[in-house]
Image (cartoon, grey):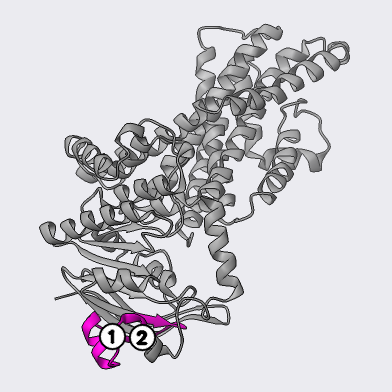
Amino acid sequence: MEKIKKYLRVMYILWLRQIKKYSRSRARMIGSLAQPILFLVALGFGFGPIYQKASGENYIQFIAPGIISMSIIFTAMFTGIEVIYDKQFGFLKETLVAPVPRWVIMVGRTLGGATVSTLQGVVVFFISLIVGFRPENFITAPLAIVFMIMIALLFTAFGTAIASRMEDMQAFPLIINFLIMPLFFLSGALFPLDNLPHSIQVITFINPLSYGVDGIRGILTHVTHFGLGTDLLVLCIFVSIILLVGTHLFTKIEA
Amino acid sequence: MKIIEARGLVKKFDDITAVDHISFHVNKGEIFAFLGPNGAGKTTTIKMFTTLLQPTDGTIRINGFDPTTQPHDVRRSFGIIFQDPSTDDDLTAYENLEFHGVLYDIPKDTRRERINELLKIVELESRRNDLVKEFSGGMKRRLEIARGLLHHPTIIFLDEPTLGLDPQTRNHLWDYIKSMNQKEGVTVFFSTHYMEEADRMADRIAIIDHGTIVADGTPKELKDQTSSHSLEEAFLALTGKDMREESATGIDHLRNMRRVWKK
């Protein structure tokens, strides 16, 4: 019991560190909002008329959940770079020699990055309201945060796991972009998953982001492809696996 | 009682042998100097002692524990002041110390008290709420030292602790380390390439060169053994060279420069 309390305190201080660092960097806050806004406005209004003609529905209603997911996955994956920063600037050693299991450090870091990413998603949600997005039900809409947290946890842990194996600060963004783009484009964030060519459909089914996007969309617009229960279950499985793998890789870091 | 013990310790990086079958021990309560030129294997040895690197061969005992199989018990036993900066630039001095205090599970009141005390000692009290990125190299170093001492470890490792410090701060620092050593019986293990520092501060010294221990003993024993008047002469007699210039290779110079840049 004492031990658990101690671990929670350590996770809390790691979490707090990341929140503080984030809140002190205004450039990061504003910079990470620019891309989702652009996508929302350019794609939302650009494809809007065509989508309307084809399906009779409003495209902003469709992509807003996708863009919320996008902002989360980007922020989450890129928080992994902090591990490389900490390696380069030496701070990582401070945590590696501490008498605390590495998994506690890994989980604390992941929670910090995930919180920042989730906040980002919430901000994009409010921006989408300005652009014209309307949730079906404002009372149940806050539940979408559950799926935002799941996406954030999954991809923060993923980014951190990759960063654990890397030294090169320049290569990290390249690799992350290389991974994010297919994950994002083949997740149902921008187009419905119905009637896709078979091979693409298979990819969207094994892409964990598909279930995150679907969950958020399900809660906000009451339209889901897989069903909310499946979405949550699949995400839980993915999060557990990635956390385990990430912890394993993080434990192996030598300084 | 032996508190640090290395037996037949080896560390290879690919085909380079950084540490080559070294054996020595440090007694509890001693101030022990690990003296050697740049690139001799001092930092590698300290990293193996502090669980940051796995030895290729040989055994280590730190406070009775094996760093390879009992890393937690070892980590609880020591504090370390790294050679390169390892504070978080985006946090304040106080936050850096607070973070450390929580990692080492120091109760809140004790933590606050010790942080205040240490900030006074390293003369950073007036800068406690400033971000570390605004600090000079020397100030960062002092903060790091305060941090390493915060949890009152049984053993404290200092890797080139006074590199880049002005003489006044250096004296202050040693006064504090000595008093920790005397009052609380903390074992001090420090690496240095300053002979006079080793001579003046250490109860015992091990000299390392090219990854092997050339000699160990009290400063007096080392001098007597080689019938020299200063440690400098002893070192020359033992290794056949003067530590200051000739032993530093181009890579060592680059490494030193990198250290300066990083500050």
Q: Looking at the image, can residue A1 be seen?
A: no
Q: Is residue B22 left or right of residue B253?
A: left
Q: Which residues are magenta?
A: B207-233
- Secondary-structure class at tag 2: helix
Query: Image quadrant for the N terminus of chain A?
Result: top left
Mark 2 near mark 1, Cβ–Cβ under 8 Å?
A: yes
Task: Judge from the rendering whether residue A39 lies leftward or rightward of residue B236; answer left or right.
Answer: right
Determine which quarter of the picture holds residue B253. bottom right
Alpha carbon separation for disc pair 2 and 1: 7 Å
Residue, disc 2: B233
Residue toward you, B129 or A141: B129
The residue at which mark 1 appears reads as B229
Q: Position of residue A200 (x, y in %)?
A: 79, 40
Q: Position of residue B153 (x, y in %)?
A: 22, 56
Q: Is residue A85 visible?
A: yes
Q: Is residue B213 highlighted in magenta?
A: yes
Tell me what residue is drawn at x 51 percent, y 56 percent: A249
Q: Residues within 10 Å of mark 1 (few under 14, many from 20)?
A: few
Looking at the picture, tell me which residue is in the foreground, A131 or A242: A131
Indicate yes or no whether the magenta region holds residue B105. no
